[in-house]
Amino acid sequence: DHRERYYSDAYRVPANLGLDYEWFAADEWESQCANKIQNFFCNTVNGRNDMVYEIDGTIIEEKALHPVAIIATNAEASLASSGAYQKECVDLFWNTPLRTGERRYYDNCLYLFALLALSGNYRIYR
């Protein structure tokens, strides 16, 4: 039971914040939340993006199942953030290869969505 952890399903939250803000820019809280997430991963975690975390930020000494997904969605959060870590998150993503082997499906799907969103090619049609 991982309901109290920042775990696989939670990785989509920064991506959703970024994409919603890119499309609508209606809620300033999304930008504030994206800034906090990026600050956590770039400042607090600082190089340990492949771990599991409690929702209060405690680092669990357990490897994440989808480390590429964490990097990709943190980069996608840059679409909403206005903080100091936008470029750092995007650069890390840009320099992260697609995952190979076991568990690549989820990581690489989120990688693709982040790449589309950051390139401006993940569009809403009305």
Image (spheres, helix red, strand yellow):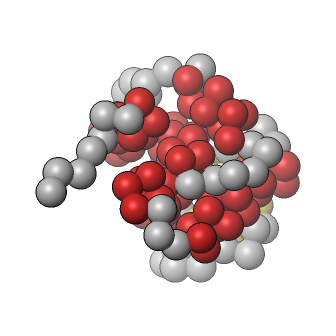
* Residue 73 point in image, percent of width and height: 51, 47
Which residue is found at the position 24% from the left and 51% from the top? 124
Q: Viewer-proximal residue, 57 or 100?
A: 57
Q: In the rendered image, which quarter contains the C terminus?
A: bottom left
Residue 13 visible from this viewpoint: yes
Asked where in the image residue 105 lies, by quadrant, the reply is top left
Apparent side of residue 85 relative to residue 43 in the rendered image (left or right): left
Q: Is residue 48 visible?
A: no
Q: How many marks?
A: 0
The percent position of residue 119, horizontal first and vertical second, equals 41, 30
Q: Residue at x 27, y 45 (%)?
A: 123
Farthest-out residue, left: 126
Residue in the foreground of this view, choosing between 122 and 105: 122
Quadrant in the rendering for residue 48: top right
Vertical comparison of 84 with 27: above or below: above
Instruction: Please tell me which residue is depicted at 70% across the width and 58% down the height of the picture.
Output: 35
Residue 3 picture location, percent across and down: 52, 79
Q: Is residue 24 left or right of residue 43?
A: left
* Front residue (pair 62, 112): 112
Residue 11, placed above or below residue 47: below
Residue for point 61% across, 73% down: 29
